[in-house]
Amino acid sequence: IICLTILGLESVAPVSEYQIITQEQFDFFKSKYNHIVVLGDNDETGRQFIIKHVKKYNIPHYLFPKSMGKDISDNISLYGINRIKSIV
């Protein structure tokens, strides 16, 4: 969440990657934001997190390529804020 805020993006996250946001939460976010994208870590747990949300809510997703770091904070450290901001 902090990394996305640094990039100028509002974000929310469940307590755990094993938890799916509820329909009520999704409806609230949908009423508040023009774009909703699910972002997960590029590991098995993160990919499953993305799949569950995409299937349930039919929303776009983003996953960093395996050639990059597994999550947004890794990638900011590796490539810098400006490059990651242009990707996300």
Image (tube, rainbow, N blue to C red):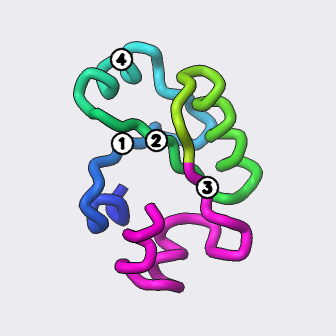
User: Which labelled disc corresponds to residue 12?
Assistant: 1
Earlier in the chain: of badge 3 and badge 1, it is 1
Q: Residues within 10 Å of mark 3 (few under 14, many from 20)?
A: some
Q: Are marks 3 and 1 in contact (CB under 8 Å)?
A: no
Mark nearer the N terminus (2 vs 4): 4
Disc 4 residue crowd, few under 14, some 14–19, many 20+, Cα 10 Å: few
Q: Is residue 43 left or right of residue 73?
A: right
Is 70 magenta? The answer is yes
Question: Residue at label 2?
Answer: 37
Say whether residue 22 is left or right of residue 30: right
What secondary structure is found at the residue carrying circle 1? Answer: loop
- Which residue in the structure is indicated by mark 3? 63
- Tell me which numbered mark, 4 or 1, is placed earlier along the sequence: 1
Marks 4 and 3 sit apart, C-alpha to C-alpha, by: 23 Å
Query: Which residues make up the magenta segment?
Result: 62-88
Q: Which numbered disc flags the more N-terminal residue, 4 or 3?
A: 4
Q: Quadrant of the N terminus?
A: bottom left
Q: Secondary structure at mark 2?
A: loop
Q: Could you give the CA–CA distance between mark 4 and mark 1, rounded to whole angstroms?
A: 14 Å
- Above or below: residue 22 compared with residue 3: above
- Verify whether residue 72 appears in magenta: yes
Picture residue at 36% right of the left edge, 42% below the top = 12
User: Vertical placement of 39 versus 8: above or below?
Assistant: above
Amino acid, disc 4: Asp
Which residue in the protein does label 4 denote? 27
Residue type at tag 2: Val
